[in-house]
């Protein structure tokens, strides 16, 4: 099914960033249905995995930058820190399952920020979460009947919380993921085989660049940038360090200097005007940062380019 661009890209208010304890009675796992679900009226993110099982009612799933249709028989998977929103519709029935990484996959020794890069052979359970933006996990009748029964069993064990409950709940969760794999395995394997390692991170960096391009003339904080692209500040910090080796301030300054180079090369704006357009507080500070990056002053950089141009 073709996805649509989601309105989640332009949130009217800052995104909520939930911890497990904010939405579940326990810190490791929780399950709710439409009768016990906590209200949530806007896009948000959370530090845990989430599985949404739609029993009745048709709605939509805004996840990352896309919108997917959620019909009865659909299972949705949400990675930790992925911005998303599934509106509740009248007369709908559903289950929401929340699980921490150490609860769902206790043997997987991977930082939560590296989940999208984990090879499918190492943790096939992650594939539905990683490719949710690209696929609709709609199940046929018999398969979905199994999933609904598993959810009821999970709810029973979560209420009991006795000996063996955690093991049983984990096994039911893995069975649920396995059922989705059985029906959508070819699509998941094909996506995993494509040279799209770090797809989610690359998309996040693309969104970051687009945001910064429009805002470089203003002061920009890490918190503002992270909120604009639906990431937590901590996740954005790790993402930049892993992908570029830079801190947010270093990355932002490099973008400002890059724009300054373009303006020095292609315009007749004064150095003072260029400093302002690139978001530097004054001409002197701009000069110091430019020299640090380019080993030459802005004026000397422009003169050098002019000499080359007219040689």
Image (cartoon, rainbow, N blue to C red):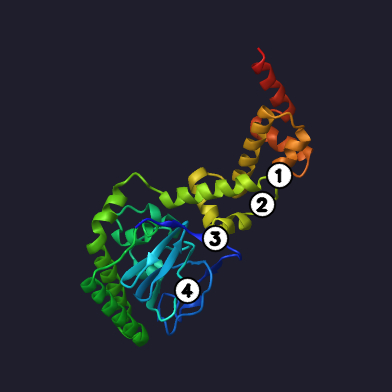
Residue 299 place in picture, x, y as percent: 74, 27
Determine the CA span between mark 4 and mark 3. 15 Å
Determine the CA span between mark 2 and mark 1. 9 Å
Residue at image mark 3: 232
Residue 125 in the figure: left or right of residue 234: left
Mark 2 crowdedness (10 Å alpha carbons): few <14, some 14-19, many ≥20: some
Quadrant where the image shows the N terminus: bottom left
Nearest to the eye among marks 3 and 1: give it.
Answer: 1
Residue 239 in the figure: left or right of residue 161: right
Which residue lies at the image location 40% right of the left edge and 79% below the top edge? Answer: 92
Nearest to the eye among marks 2 and 4: give it.
Answer: 2
Residue 39 place in picture, x, y as percent: 51, 78
Mark 2 and mark 4 lie on one chain; the one further toward the N terminus is 4
Determine the CA span between mark 2 and mark 4. 30 Å
Q: Is residue 169 above or below residue 249?
A: below
Which element is circle 2 on?
loop
Q: Which mark is residue 220?
A: 2
Residue 230 in the figure: left or right of residue 60: right
Which element is circle 4 on?
helix
Q: Is residue 130 above or below residue 282?
A: below
Which residue lies at the image location 72% right of the left edge and 22% below the top edge? Answer: 303
Q: Is residue 164 visible?
A: no
Residue 84 in the figure: left or right of residue 261: left
Which element is circle 3 on?
loop
Mark 3 and mark 2 lie on one chain; the one further toward the N terminus is 2
Which of the 4 quarters of the picture holds residue 311? top right
Cβ atoms at labels 2 and 1 below 8 Å apart: yes
Viewer-side residue, 200 vs 135: 135
Q: Which mark is residue 20?
A: 4
Q: Which mark is residue 279?
A: 1
Mark 3 and mark 1 lie on one chain; the one further toward the N terminus is 3
Which residue lies at the image location 52% right of the left edge and 60% below the top edge? Answer: 7
């Amino acid at each position: 099914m073709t996805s649509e661009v989601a309105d989640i890209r332009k949130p009217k208010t800052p995104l909520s960033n939930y911890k497990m304890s904010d939405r579940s009675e326990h810190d490791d796992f929780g399950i709710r249905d439409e009768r016990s679900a906590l209200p949530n009226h806007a896009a948000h993110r959370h530090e845990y995995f989430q599985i949404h099982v739609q029993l009745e009612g048709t709605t939509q799933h805004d996840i990352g930058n896309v919108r997917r249709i959620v019909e009865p028989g659909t299972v949705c998977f949400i990675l930790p820190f992925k911005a998303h929103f599934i509106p509740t519709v009248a007369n709908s029935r559903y289950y929401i399952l929340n699980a921490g990484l150490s609860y769902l996959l206790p043997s997987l020794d991977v930082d939560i920020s590296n989940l999208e890069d984990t090879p499918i052979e190492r943790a096939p359970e992650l594939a539905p979460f990683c490719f949710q933006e690209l696929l609709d996990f709609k199940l046929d009748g018999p398969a979905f009947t199994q999933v609904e029964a598993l959810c009821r069993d999970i709810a029973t064990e979560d209420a009991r919380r006795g000996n063996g409950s955690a093991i049983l709940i984990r096994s039911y969760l893995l069975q649920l993921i396995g059922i989705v794999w059985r029906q959508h395995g070819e699509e998941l394997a094909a996506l995993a085989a494509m040279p799209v390692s770090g797809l989610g991170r690359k998309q996040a960096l693309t969104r970051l660049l687009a945001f910064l391009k429009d805002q470089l003339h203003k002061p920009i904080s890490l918190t503002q940038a992270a909120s604009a692209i639906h990431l937590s500040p901590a996740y954005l910090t790790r993402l930049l360090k892993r992908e570029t080796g830079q801190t947010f301030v270093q990355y932002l300054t490099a973008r400002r200097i890059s724009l300054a180079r373009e303006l020095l090369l292609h315009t007749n704006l004064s150095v003072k005007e260029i400093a302002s357009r690139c978001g530097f507080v004054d001409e002197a500070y701009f000069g110091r940062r430019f020299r640090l990056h380019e080993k030459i002053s802005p004026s000397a950089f422009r003169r050098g380019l002019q000499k080359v141009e007219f040689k």
